[in-house]
Image: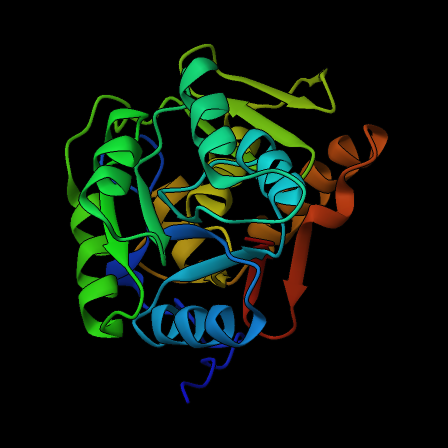
Amino acid sequence: MFGDPDPELVGIRPKTLIKPGSQEPPPMKILLIEDDRMLADYVAGGLRESGHVVDHCEDGKTGLFAVAEAAHDVVILDRMLPAVDGMTILQTMRASDNLTPVLILTALGEVDDRVEGLRKGGDDYLSKPFSLQELIARVEALGRRPARSRQIDRLAAPGIEMDLLRRQVRVRSREVRLTSREFQILEVLLRNAGRVVTRGMLLEAVWDYRFDPQTNIVDQHVSRLRQKLGEAEAASVIETVRGIGYRVRG
């Protein structure tokens, strides 16, 4: 069985930091909608061992909410789900112009089933039983694909939405006005959601410092950012990782 990496150490590598304005996709954030808990743990464990962030929903109702609430790089979708079936989720996504790549993962493996899934908006189809290595390879290929919606113009975390084109931040539909530095800090944290971003990484990404100026400039700006988000009831989204830096929940 696969084990989860230490969450305090994930992503503490300056080379992998996604900086403001980057056109590279952020680290793979995957939504797994699968009602079989044992299978879901197996798949999620393998994806996390490969360095990816995984959100898991056990039924179609919570899965439908998750695809609407937060941005993901790839969705792994079981067809036969309680509450709301997988094809309904897929059709709802496409009807609302959500073009996130979807890998359909199901026991329904007949040709007609595969054709239906792909014609209704699926990007790939994998039948159970399957090879975990093949699943990971297919997911990573979907994440690299320059698809219709791959240009990033919005970032999101629970309750927060950032519009990169309009340079706006909204918390539960309420606009929060940020300075340029505060916006850049939040952008870096959102692009690296689920990973620890060190103070040194923020200094380089936001201030272009490649040395430690021996000040608490980062902490001061994060404190002001939290204060503004707190007025809109979202201060807790930014977590402090003691002695290291900050993290936005993925």
Residue 45 x, y percent position in the rendering: 43, 76
Q: Can residue 146 be seen in this view?
A: yes
Q: Residue furthest top?
A: 166
Q: Is residue 110 above or below residue 89?
A: below
Relative placement, left or right, of 131 versus 249 is left
Q: 130 or 53: which is nearer to us?
A: 130
Q: How many marks?
A: 0
Q: Which residue is drawn at 72% across and 17% down?
A: 173
Assign the N terminus to one quadrant of the image: bottom left
Residue at the location (17% across, 44% down)? 144
Position in image of residue 150 (x %, y %): 26, 29
| Residue found 36% across the figure and 35% down from its top | 20
The structure's colour scheme is rainbow
* Horizontal arrangement in the rendering, residue 135 relative to residue 161 (left or right): left
Residue at 53 percent across and 29 percent down: it is: 183
| In the image, residue 37 above or below residue 26 | below
Give how far across and how far down residue 242 sits, in percent: 65, 73
Picture coordinates of residue 41, whole percent (x, y): 50, 74
Asked if residue 143 can be seen in this view, the reply is no
Report which quarter residue 174 is drawn in: top right
Q: Nearer the viewer, residue 168 or 152?
A: 152
